[in-house]
Amino acid sequence: MDTTDDDLRLLVVGLDAGCLPVLTPLFEAGETPTLERLFDDGTHAPLESQIPPWTASAWPSMYTGKNPGKHGVFDFLAFDGYDWDVVNATHVRERAVWELLSDHGLSSVVVNVPVTHPARPFDGALIPGMTAPEDPDCHPEGILEEVKDACGDYRIYPQSGPEPDQSIEGYERTIELRGAAFRYLLERFAPDFGFVQFQQTDSVFHERPGEKSAIEAVYRAVDRELRETIEAFEPENVLVVSDHGIGPVEGYEFRVNEFLRDRGDVSAQSGGEGMPTWSRAWENDLLEGEDAGDHDPSALERTMNVAAKFGVTTQRVANTLDLVGLKEPIGRRVPNDMIRAGSEQVDFPNSRAYVRSKSELGIRLNLEGREPNGRVSAEEYEAVRAALIDELSAVETPDGEAMFEAVEPRETYFDGPELDRGPDILTVPAAFDNAIVGGLEGERFADPVEPWNHKRTGVVCATGPAFDESVSLGSPTIFDVAPTICSLFDVPVDAEMDGTVLPAVEPGERAEYPAYEPEPITATDDEAVEDRLSDLGYL
């Protein structure tokens, strides 16, 4: 086709959790003809994610081209001593690729990419994705209201609409609005670069695990929006990417904090103070409005707190209910705070080592001089860490199989000025067919609570004249996406990026850029966001 200054030179489509084991059956069934055509016409390969292969850390790695030790986001949560907050864009301490393009006179439209709120200024428009509150501040100011007027509505999370929670109709409407908003902004700003991400391709597996009809409905909806976008704007090149894969978890859940308690590293307490209270009730606050996070302990919660101090915990109650077949229905109706109030929790200030968040796949040491009540001295740090690595490496499941594929010091996976924000030890489950959790529930091993979860291998597909489709993509990683985008636009690749340009693209030069100076970190402080992440099993 003829090209003009208004042409969309590159469209990036983000499929959260997209991977060939999910896509191939959809292609074979004819459910996603647009995606199938892109894969048939272009070149594609499995895309290796990072450790940890979880949304909140992986997308910043993709859009900066740098590992968490440089960009600073290791998980859905950031920790300051024993305090915590859900991560947001101020925790990302490196340039996003669209900011780099903007510095070279190129404009972008970015919609729904996780960990991009609050929006930072650049040439173009941005509506944030996951970890943003509903109705977030966008760039430029006022653009979300304009989008809602033009498209009829917009939402980040399906729960914000009138459809039933976790319904196929809610997924479809959310995806439809996502596509409509993206196309409106493409028309409005005529950018060089467009990036739209679809989160429901991941959340459907967490909310309706393995349910074929729901998965197909989500992908059909994404395929429709992709088809309409391509037909309307005829992008010169298309890059389909994912942050990780997904699949069934058929091994074991390993309660690392129970292992650490047996070693004498974890001190426990009861009463609801040891772990953050992620969600305030079993109903999602996103449905209840901006004041839904206001919370006073109920009489039942206070009673459970007192009962826990005398050894009457929800674990014991649940075991009794299980005997009479009531554990499952009762568990669905008891608010999460009641459960936590009657549970044992890690007493972080009085422990030596612990798992803070399961999705960072790591263990943190309570280090003197770093944590307010540090229990491990700087002199013994390396010895304590090495001993833990050795013991965890030897852990076997009840079937006699290795629990972990790797147990390594953080330096194996991360490097950079933000290294100290990450966990001290990384624990990589074998083939991600096992899972780790941080709860204290007596036994070390159990069947996994989440039957589907993340895998390390995602997917990448490249098509268009900028890509040599006869060239194999080799073994690309998530860090290769940003350098590839830069090279396609003839923008020098940041020498600090950890990836390389995909072989299908002519590599550009690398250059040293001035140190990035991000805004100060600000709190997310939105309980509806916390509840959404909890509902998806991330917290």
Image (tube, helix red, strand yellow):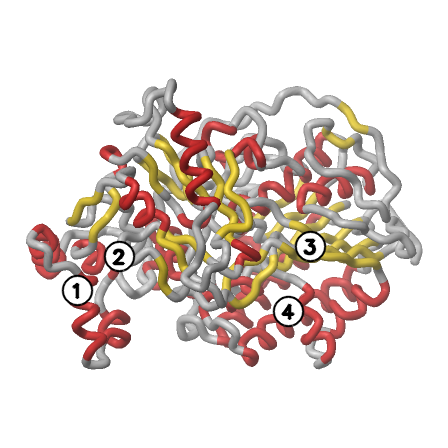
Residue at x 71%, y 71% (from the top left corner): 24
Classify residue 432 as left or right of residue 257: right
| Badge 4 or badge 2: first in the primary sequence | 4
Reading the image, the residue beneath label 2 is: 441
Say which of 468 and 200 sits in front: 468
Reading the image, the residue beneath label 3 is: 241
The disc label shown at residue 45, or none? none
The disc label shown at residue 22, or none? 4
- Mark whose residue sits in front, 3 or 4: 4
For the N terminus, which image quadrant? bottom right
The disc label shown at residue 316, or none? 1
Classify residue 125 as left or right of residue 269: right
| Badge 1 or badge 2: first in the primary sequence | 1
Secondary element at image label 4? helix
Distance CA(mark 3)–CA(mark 2): 38 Å
Q: Residues within 10 Å of mark 3 (few under 14, many from 20)?
A: many
